[in-house]
Amino acid sequence: MKPAAKTALRILLLGLGIGLFAVYLGRSGVREVFGAFAKLGAAAPLVLIPYFAVYIVDAIGWRLTFLPPVALRFVTFWRIRWIGEAVNNLIPSAYIGGEALKVYLLRQRGVDASAATTAAIVSKSAQTLAQLLFICAAAGLFLRIAPEVPWLRRSLAVVLGGGLAAVGVLFWIQSRGVFGSVRQLTAAVGWNPAWLESRREKLEATDHQITGFYRHHRGRFLASTSMYLTGWMLDATEIYLVAHLLGQPITPTQALVVEAFVGVAKVMGMWVPGAMGVQEGGILLIGRTAGLPEPLCLAYAVLRRAREILFVGVGWILFYLSRISPKG
């Protein structure tokens, strides 16, 4: 697809997403939703704490996948991750764009490109595995609290089956060599880009580092996965906190279920900028099925979107400042 066509498609998807969001908001009533925000009052900044904590925990999980450990200050490391996540949350690139930017920023600070690339792939694998474990646990809880809904068991089976298959393929490709597999694929279709061939030795070395990490540093991989799993659980505290602050308390089980499957909805909407509309629809559908009142679901959807905009904005500001002072 040509770049102009891709841009047009993304604009169309964004427009559809905004339209869906407007429909969801209109169903519950703008006054009712925004009236809920007035209840937050001075407690509103507390809503930012869970996601802020997630960024710290995820940065620790990412740092564990570097061999040897990077010499950068943790605050610099954490800032680079924040920048990468801001790109991933805004630009529809299947979460690849932000990872590439992290590698670039680390290289500017003297981190070996191969080590940074290896860490990017291994940490994303750890994060994906952690999300699958989180979803599996939430699926069991979902079946316990949700009413008898004909489509629920089938949908959960599809999600879990697809997730297991995706993780299996992910690790299978890495065992064969990520870049080696790319070269084989391009050769099979008769396309041999010069830039790929010119970097063949470096890419093969990176493949060896990836397989070596899994073979010799399983403890670090498990520790990284554990940190990401902790991050997913911390994510669930956001809606739990919002519900209590709005005077509509929910159970920890409901919070875990909503967070787990809203994450699935975001993955499904990864090609829509910001998963606009898709995320909100997921919150409404999953929240109502889990027993949450519709006004709370919509209020949380709006609040979550506002929080994302704030964190993305800070990330882009950090990116701008890093270009001014690349060693900072």
Image (spheres, rainbow, N blue to C red):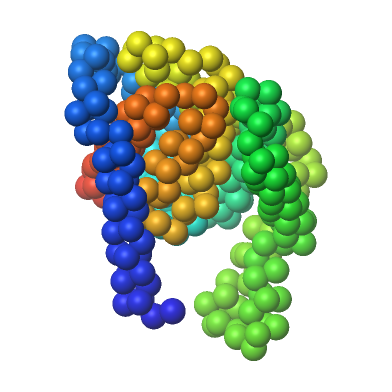
Quarter of the image for residue 281 reads top left
Reply above or below: 323 against 284. Answer: below
Q: Is residue 210 visible?
A: no
The one of 4 and 217 positioned closer to us in this rendering: 4
The one of 179 and 18 positioned closer to us in this rendering: 18
Q: Quadrant of the N terminus?
A: bottom left
Query: From this viewpoint, which residue is outermost toward the bottom?
Result: 190
Q: Is residue 170 visible?
A: yes
Reply above or below: 11 against 53. Answer: below
In the image, what residue occupies the spot 35% across and 77% down? 5
Task: Report the number of numbered marks.
Answer: 0
In the image, what residue occupies the spot 54% across and 82% down? 194
Reply above or below: 21 against 252. Answer: below
The one of 178 and 194 positioned closer to us in this rendering: 178
Asked whether, in this view, residue 14 is left or right of residue 145, the answer is left
Q: Quadrant of the C terminus?
A: top left
In the image, what residue occupies the spot 31% across and 71% down? 8
In the image, what residue occupies the spot 56% across and 48% down? 120
Question: Residue 303 in the image: x percent, y percent?
Answer: 31, 30
Query: From this viewpoint, which residue is outermost toward the right?
Result: 215
Question: Residue 241 in the image: x percent, y percent?
Answer: 41, 16
Asked whether, in this view, residue 325 is left or right of residue 96, the answer is left
Quarter of the image for residue 208 reads bottom right
Question: Residue 289 in the image: x percent, y percent?
Answer: 54, 32
Quarter of the image for residue 131 reads top right
